[in-house]
Amino acid sequence: MLPNAYVQSAQIGGWEAALNLRFANRFNKTLLVQRNHTGPLTVQRPFYPEGDVCHVYLLHPPGGIVGGDDLTISINAETGSHALITTPAAGKFYRSDGLWASQKVNIDITEGAVVEWLPQETIIYQGAQLKSTININLANSARFIGWEILSLGRPASGEGFDYGAVDLNWHIRCDHRPLFLERLRLDAEAFAARWGLQGFSACGTFFAKTANKQSLAAVQNLIANEPCRGVTLIDDILICRALDARSDRLRAFFEQVWATIRPEVLQRQSRIPRIWLT
């Protein structure tokens, strides 16, 4: 059963929401110096469990997205800043009667800045129609760690993904030069096929830039002989992919990858956001 507000929202074409965040280094500490939003999309106050790194939790008060909704998140990290952005809970895309839901994330990272984009998993209900685009624009000395974790259907409730569609786009550029461009379409056929998800409900991709062969070897050792896990290094971008029957296990694996490579990529030990433990 969808919330009444969302049923009405879908009937009139959906809600538009936008959030703009800008981070800057002030007195050796990253501050959220600008935030403005329209529609139901905002952030909690920043947290500083690491002292100087700004941890921010994205909030979408309605709790889910339906066909016709259009969300845009824009993040700008100024020189020397370091922001970690996550969510307090899993995102949800509900079944659609024909309209597409759209989500766009634009992250601009300037010289010497760091952004970690680590949202909790996204649950895509059977019958949902989602278009997602994530644009990462880095300066030459900028660094980025990010992941995307999807759960297709709700296996705990006996729901698979017999209909619906997900159109995923990742664009990573450095100084406007394309480094990694990918478009992935997931539907019922791809969900079930041996060349696709093979019936696994959870799939995910993890990115890290700037990585090196030591980072690659560390993740390879972490994976060992574990099935449905893989990692590669394309120039200085580490890409790790995984499939699982459960999204919580996949996220726990990505948290291990993050904790393993963060000291090498960002010269910082991992510090788990408090919201992940609640």
Image (cartoon, rainbow, N blue to C red):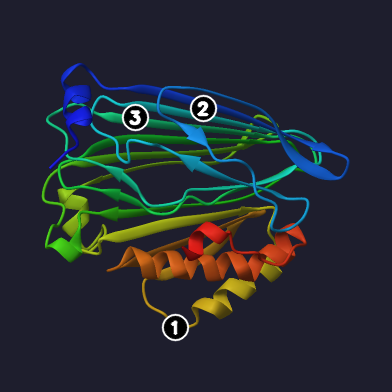
Residue beneath label 2, please? Answer: 19
Q: Which secondary structure, mark 2?
A: strand
Q: Residue at x 44, y 54 (%)?
A: 120
Q: Does 156 sit above or below residue 91? A: below
- Asked if residue 28 can be seen in this view, the reply is yes
Q: Answer whether labels 3 and 2 touch (C-beta < 8 Å).
A: no
- Which residue occupies the foreground of this view, 138 or 123? 123
| Towards the viewer: 53 or 68 | 53
Residue lying farthest to the top in this orientation: 12
Q: What number is the disc on residue 102?
A: 3
Q: Residue 24: percent from the left, percent from the top? A: 76, 34
Helix, strand, or loop for circle 3? strand
Mark 1 or mark 3, whichever is nearer to me: 3
Q: Residue furthest right?
A: 27
User: Could you tell me residue 137's position as x and y percent?
Assistant: 63, 34
Q: Which of pointers 2 and 1 indicates the residue nearer the eye?
A: 2
Choose the circle earlier in sequence order: 2 or 1: 2
Viewer-side residue, 268 vs 15: 15
Amino acid type indicated by mark 3: Ser
Identify the amino acid type marked 2.
Leu
Q: Residue at x 32, y 41 (%)?
A: 63
* Disc number placed over residue 225 in the picture, else none: 1
* Label 1 or label 3, whichever comes before in sequence order: 3
Quadrant in which residue 265 is drawn: bottom right
Q: CA distance from mark 2 to mark 1?
A: 41 Å
* Residue count near mark 2 (Cα–Cα under 10 Å), binned few <14, some 14–19, many ≥20: many
On the image, the x and y values in percent for residue 264 come to 73, 65
Q: Is residue 166 above or below residue 214?
A: above
Q: Residue at x 14, y 62 (%)?
A: 157
Q: Amino acid at mark 1?
A: Asn
